[in-house]
Amino acid sequence: MRKRSCTKQLICVCNVKMVPVHAACALFSLTPLLVLGVPPIWTQPEQVHLAYPGEPGSMVVTWTTFSKTESKVEYGILGGQFFEMTTKGNTTLFVDSGEEKRKLYIHRVILTGLKPAVNYVYHCGSDEGWSDVFYFTALNDSTSFSPRFALYGDLGNENPQSLARLQKDTQLGMYDVILHIGDFAYDMHEDNARIGDEFMRQIQSIAAYVPYMTCPGNHEATYNFSNYRNRFSMPGQTESLWYSWNLGSAHIISLSTEVYFYLEFGLELLFKQYEWLKKDLEEANKPENRAVRPWIITMGHRPMYCSDDDQDDCTKFDSYVRLGRKDTKPPAPGLEDLFYRYGVDLELWAHEHTYERLWPVYADKVYNGSKEQPYVNPKAPVHIVTGSAGCREKTDSFNPNPKEWSAFRSTDYGYTRMKVFNTTHIYLEQISDDQYGKVIDSIWVVKEKHGFSAWF
Ligand SMILES: [Fe+2]
């Protein structure tokens, strides 16, 4: 094919420019190679998503281009003049570690001075290409605000069963924030990170409208979590691995359970995170802080407890996440005692492709508030495992004989909704996508007292 087209072109060129036949033929035989060697111009923004940087009145917009461009967000108050404000940000080059060493330009722009609870319209990009127009509500920074969350883990590029329902919920304005508790895309690095691109395009329909807050899971581990670290923009200086932030009457801590499993990326990370968690919990427990934000909620990918039948860490009595590791030097502390000591109220997990609600539990024992009202003034943290959003690995199955701390479980695809009503009441419900959005489980966690002393 190439030879023939060369001949055709040759006649034309020779007639016009009188180029010697052999030279022209050589030149044109190289043409396809030259074309392949020229990078395409891809300045169109895509994969737009929001995150809350933790400072009241702020929002960070993150997106991707495949050629280098400026990073600008043009925005304005909904109902006012479109794009009357412009904020510039920065661009980072992310070179994927796959064979092709694909280059992604990740753009980040932090908007500040936003008015709480006000709706904004925005687009992002540069004069070489603008995204669609999106909108968001600036988070209300009042401690009396009652934020509404969607939360889940383990949502993939293939078989993302809950995504359509989440898209509709989000666009109906049902959530202020989405928490994705690890395991994205399956896997972001695959096909030279094209699966990551595809997944980020898929979630743009929710993540460009509300802050999409994340923590890493095991499916992000390839190339030392580089796709995760580069694509998301969580608060703090830890490349989104662990951080905390406040909303309404809640202090929310996001952590990496993966530091307990991928020691090849540094045992020191495990200790660094542990020390950071301790400091963060100490700060959150200062009487003046806990008085206004009494709820401490953690999110991490791999649970301490679960009753699935897959031999995962949470199925074992000596779970690494719960009790730490004794096979490291020095031994690594687990998280259960730390969270109990600092009075963590609610612990959100995923990884198991099922939904499981636990009775208040500590050290493998149930500590209900009372027999009649287990979640009213519980005497230990409440755990929720919600990893059934949908991915190519399908759902998991349960051990037929769960321990006594297992309160409710479901193998339906779905996700969890949470509303932090006020300083004493949190509501949680589980949505089954298999049952067309039916609420299959719900609880109120009621606490008149928070902190370590609340356990007694
Ligand atoms: Fe996982």
Image (cartoon, rainbow, N blue to C red):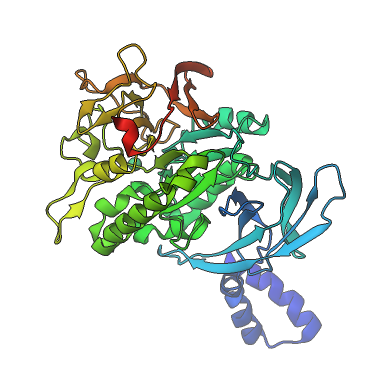
Name the image quarter holding the C terminus: top left
Q: Quadrant of residue 72?
A: bottom right
Q: Residue at x 26, y 33 (%)?
A: 305
Q: Residue furthest top?
A: 372
**Which of 129/263 is in front?**
263
- Quadrant of picture, ligand 1: top left
Q: Nearer the viewer, residue 92 or 236?
A: 236
Residue 191 location, x and y as percent?
44, 54
Q: Residue at x 22, y 22 (%)?
A: 399
Residue 275 lies left or right of residue 163; in this view the side is left
Question: What residue appears at the point 32 percent right and 36 percent down from the top-left corner?
Answer: 453
Residue 424 located left or right of residue 82: left
Task: Identify the residue shown where x is 74% and y is 82%.
Answer: 14
Please state which of residues 328 and 66 is positioned toward the viewer in this rendering: 328
Is residue 366 something that shows in the picture? yes
* 250 with respect to 319 (left or right): right
Return the residue nearer the eye: 381 or 148: 381
Position in image of residue 403 (x %, y %):
20, 22
The percent coordinates of residue 294 (x first, y second) are 46, 38
- Depicted 92 relative to depicted 189: above or below: below
Q: Furthest-left residue in view?
A: 327
Q: Position of residue 36 (x, y in %)?
A: 57, 69
Quarter occupied by the N terminus: bottom right
Q: Is residue 267 above or below residue 163?
A: below
- Does the image show residue 133? no
